[in-house]
Amino acid sequence: MRQHPLFGLALATFGALMLTPDALFMRWSGMGGYQMVGWRGLLMGLVFLILWALTSKHRLRDLSILASGYAIGIVVCQYANATLFSLGIANAPVAVVLFAVATVPVFAAIFARLIIGEPTRLATWITIAVVMGGIALAVFGGGHGDVTLDRAALWGALAGLGVAMVLALNFVILRAQPQVPILLVIGLGAVLAGATGVIVTGPAAMMQGEVWAIAICGLVILPVSFFSLSLASRYTHASNVSLLLLLETVMGPLWVWLGTGEGPTPMMLLGGTIVVVSLAIYLWQTGRRRMALQS
């Protein structure tokens, strides 16, 4: 069945929007880093593995593909993503972590060129530059919400950059190797990260905090968003998926504002406007270009 030329972009947009309240629920949980890794990894991973077991028509083939280097690479990427993001959010300002995660488009463009020779249009690079400037304003623009680069913030930036690298590599591999079973490899990586979190935290301490909040992350937000984003990478360029993922960087703090009363600064609002408008223009132009190529 032939997909609509905008299917990949629409799916990536949906996945990115689903991911935006993730940091809010993590804050509401009041949990430590590895405790969140445990809950988020196990819940999300089990959802993915159960769905794979129920829907896959080629389980033996999927398991054989699991031994390939590409599949193992995605498992490792998901393990690192699940671990680094939770540790970053737990130990650093959310804004710093999300700003660093926003570098996904840069890594995606680099990996796409290095691994599969996928060209990156000039318009993509221009959009990356503009949205990075907008995010810089949103996070470091001053006002009553200043973020200082202390040790915690530095750790958050490093964790966020690590997340950006593995997410970008994940998107590029899935586009280059469409035969890799998404549910199986991402589910396995998440479960391994979750098991690590439980071991480090200790079973007795896992029930501390607001379990309902982290359960929403693991059962709803993460499975729906990551499956949508990963699947979208098969129907549109990895840089497009990465750019849409930047919506979390802007909307995440807005969700925190609505949920905790922590208001954004004027510069944050300005930076967010720059990002959203830039993405809208880019998507409109990309959509017109793809429609023209399909006609």
Image: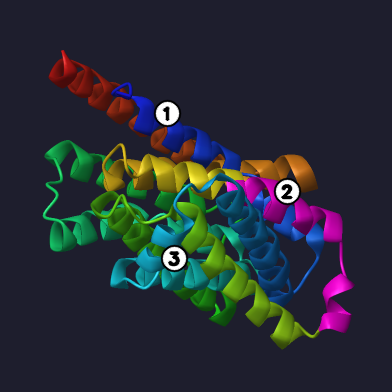
Side of 235 relative to 148 (left or right):
left
Amino acid type for the residue under numbered disc 3: Leu
Magenta residues? 203-223
In the picture, residue 288 is in which quadrant? Answer: top left
Residue at 56% x, 40% y: name it. 266
C-alpha span from label 3 to label 1: 30 Å
Residue designated by label 1: 10
Side of 214 relative to 153 (left or right):
right
- Find out whether the residues at labels 3 and 1 contact each other: C-beta distance under 8 Å: no
Quadrant of the snapshot with the C terminus: top left
Which structural element holds mark 1? helix
Where 73 falls versus 101 (above or below)?
A: below
Residue designated by label 3: 63
Side of 189 relative to 255 (left or right):
left
Where 67 falls versus 217 (above or below)?
A: below
Residue designated by label 2: 262
Pick the residue in front: 8 or 239: 8
Q: Position of residue 162 (x, y in %)?
A: 42, 71
Q: Is residue 214 highlighted in magenta?
A: yes
Whichever of labels 3 and 2 marks the residue nearer the N terminus, that label is: 3
Count neighbours of disc 1 (C-alpha within 10 A) and say few if under 14, some if 14 to 19, many if 20 or more. Answer: some
Pick the residue in front: 130 or 25: 25
Q: Is residue 213 highlighted in magenta?
A: yes
C-alpha span from label 3 to label 2: 47 Å
Q: Is residue 234 visible?
A: yes
